[in-house]
Amino acid sequence: MKLFTQLALVSAIAVSGNAMAMQALDDAQLASTTGQDGITLTIKPPIKPFAALTAGAGGVINIDSIYVHDKGGLAAADGGTDTSGAIVLDGFAIAGSAPIVVKIDADGNAGNGAFLNVNVALPSELIIRTGDIGVAQSARGVGAATTVRGLVGPSTKILDSIDVKLGGATMNIQLGNQVQAGFVNAETMIKVSGSIANGLVISGITLEDNDGVAASATNLGSSGGQISIGDIVVTDNGNLATLTLATDIDVSTNGLVLTMGGSKTDVLLADVRLGDTTLATSSIGDVEIVGLDMVGTQIAVTGH
């Protein structure tokens, strides 16, 4: 009897649920359902210490190392040795003040123009930490099996870890077909928009020259040195409070193509140092670039 009682309860719930589902909806209820389908992803990484971000962070994603393998190296005809090398990022991390929200919709777009729309909204405060950037010999030569991984020997540091501070950006991606108008292009696959409060800030840039110029009676050289920039700050021209983002991103036979939109920008290079950057005498001051106009400029990223 207990089993029959449970089945009866389940049946009653099912029937009542179906009855509610079949009730007529008035105009107000129908309006509230419009656009409610699709998929929303809310990505909130775990809370971890991240000194460069304010308290109450949305979360941090850490990656121990990233290796970008150049399996051919530099050709001997161009001064190389044809030995596979790798760009190495040690200590990569992304931290945000709130979750990343991704909204996905499939649109039929009558006329065989169906497309998948993916909208990515970044938190108002987002920091990308590159970790130390170096170069090393790669274990992955031409034709290497997928089981062959990693580096041969240690990496040589080229750049100290860099923090890129941004946030508040929105990327709208359309796959299959493209119907969205870009800032410069008639249609574009990825449209990057939004604004960054106080501009794009890149901090802690130190380029290492590990060998320098050997000292001798005929030159001013010494072993090792650095080029250091405390901060690079990019803002809208004449407005230090924001940087407006406007970029079209597409893929063509020439690779990944970025087309710059928006308007003029101002760039500040603060605390530029040359030589032994630990010494106050290495500072040459600050450099300002005012009214940089790159609207319409295209940047293609491809392999060779």
Image: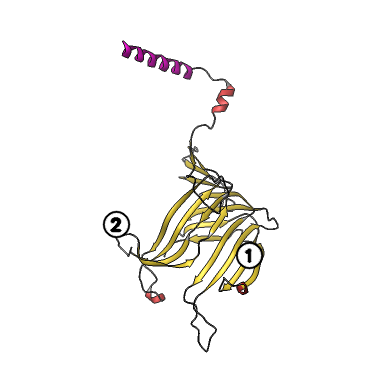
Among numbered discs 1 and 2, the one appearing first in the sequence: 2
Compared across the picture, whether 14 is left or right of 226 comes to: left
From the top left corner, tell me how far across and down residue 90 is, in percent.
Answer: 44, 60
User: Which residue is the extreme one toward the bottom?
Assistant: 217
Q: Residue at x 48, y 17 (%)?
A: 20
Number of the label disc, if any, that sits on residue 282: none
Residue 270 tag number: 1
Badge 2 amino acid:
Thr
Classify mark 2: residues with Cα within 10 Å, few (<14), some (14-19) or many (20+). Answer: few
The answer to whether 223 is drawn above or below residue 203 in the figure is below
On screen, residue 29 above or below 133: above
Count of all numbered marks drawn on residues in the image: 2
| Disc number placed over residue 147 in the picture, else none | 2
Tag 1: amino acid: Ala
Q: Which region shows up in magenta?
A: 1-22
Identify the element where label 2 is drawn. loop
